[in-house]
Amino acid sequence: MRIAALVDFDLGVQSVEYFSHPFALADAACQRDFDLLIADFRYLANIYEMRSFFTYIIFLHPLCDATTYARALRVGDYCYRYEAFEHLKSRIAYLQRRESLLQGRLWRQGKFYFDRERKKLYHETRELELSQALQELLLFLIENRDRYVDKYAIIDNLESINTEGSLKVAISRLRSLGLEIETRQGLGYKLKENE
């Protein structure tokens, strides 16, 4: 789990990247993905502008009363009082455990996520409808993502795709959704790796 922190103290949590100014955080967020941002409430307006770069946002505030909490939820996911810091550390540990459980179940390419257990494809947070054939093909390509898979192997292994024509249509539909699938003459198809 990649964690960014815009606070004036050490959180005492592993794998945190600290930033002293919102502009430095914005530059970093444009270059790499962060799963969680922990920020002092005084940066609320700055965080509002870059909230789409983070999966979760947690604010810290000295009071975190009902008004502050409501304002924090317009931008982020939670607000903790500084005194409740141990609760925050527990929350981070929970999110890290949850992410490690999902790591094996979720496949990611850019802003696409495929839940292998549920056979559902998401673009950011929006679920995309997939036919049975597209679900099977995407799952097969994910399971074989380290190599090119020829058309005969796909046709032989998938129930919903049984001709070269239906395979070409399915590949075309996955590409039209925005998924990147490489084709090599004589080798077959392969999902493009994240960079």
Image (cartoon, rainbow, N blue to C red):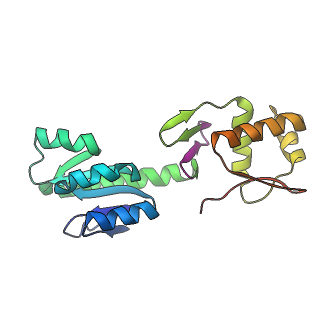
Q: Would you say residue 117 sits in the magenta stretch?
A: yes
Q: Would you say residue 164 sits in the magenta stretch?
A: no
Question: Residue 192: horizontal and vertical position, in percent?
Answer: 68, 56
Task: Identify which residue is drawn at 69% across, 29% down.
Answer: 131
Q: Nearer the viewer, residue 52 or 149?
A: 52
Question: Residue 160: horizontal and vertical position, in percent?
Answer: 80, 31
On screen, residue 174 above or below 27:
above
Q: Nearer the viewer, residue 96 or 170?
A: 170
Q: Nearer the viewer, residue 153 or 8?
A: 8
Residue 163, by quadrant, is top right
Q: The magenta stretch spans which residues?
A: 110-120
Task: Identify which residue is drawn at 22% across, 51% down.
Answer: 45
Determine if residue 20 is in view: yes
Residue 35, by quadrant, is bottom left
Question: Residue 108: horizontal and vertical position, in percent?
Answer: 57, 51
Name the image quarter holding the C terminus.
Answer: bottom right
Residue 5, by quadrant, is bottom left
Question: Residue 32: horizontal and vertical position, in percent?
Answer: 46, 63
Determine if residue 14 is in view: no
